[in-house]
Amino acid sequence: MKLKVNQQDRSYEGDPQMPLMWYLRDELGLTGTKFGCGTGLCGACTVHVDGKAARACVTPMADLSGKSVTTIEGLSADGNHPVQKAWRSANVPQCGYCQPGQIMNAAALIAANKNPSDAQILEGMQGNICRCGCYQRIFAAIKTAAKEA
């Protein structure tokens, strides 16, 4: 199967049921996508598939033929996507483990809605868990990034 990962053409010939997470981490060495729960409930593994947020731990490779996958490494070559800049400005991370998934989900949210309301941010970020409880800073960073995007 052919797909794109971070704008690069890739091919995959393995088990079609293997989760995207393991292809990214083990075969491509893209370790920014984090393993959390393994069931798509925590959001640590969030990537973009054709521009929409997707949980890499439950997305089988069989679903990706001809699609484009973007990981945290491919969001911005220099780390200056509006969401990444807002994250730094708001000092969002505490432990940082969930942050790649949080950033990827927030970037997809803002790409789909340039001016999300508070309720839309809360709804759009559902399923991305931060054990450190950085939700107020995450929310503030999303508001800031939406203004710059």
Image (tube, grey):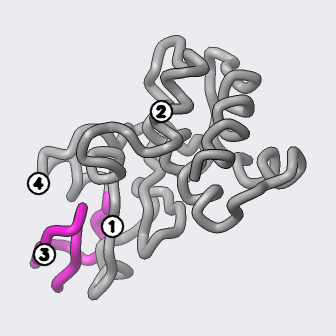
Q: Which residue is mark 1?
A: 69
Depth check, mark 4 against mark 2: the one in front is 2
Q: Which residue is mark 2?
A: 85
In the rendered image, the quadrant that contains the N terminus is bottom left
Front residue of 112 and 65:
112
Front residue of 114 and 25:
114
Tell me which numbered mark, 1 or 2, is placed earlier along the sequence: 1
Magenta stretch, residue numbers: 1-20
Depth check, mark 3 against mark 2: the one in front is 2
Q: What amino acid does circle 1 point to?
A: Val
**Which residue occupies 15% across, 48% down?**
26
Specify whether 135 is left or right of 54.
right
Q: What amino acid does circle 2 point to?
A: Lys
Q: Which residue is mark 4?
A: 27
Specify whether 48 is left or right of 65.
right
**Residue 13 higher or lower than 59, as above or below:** below
**Residue 104 higher or lower than 90, as above or below:** below
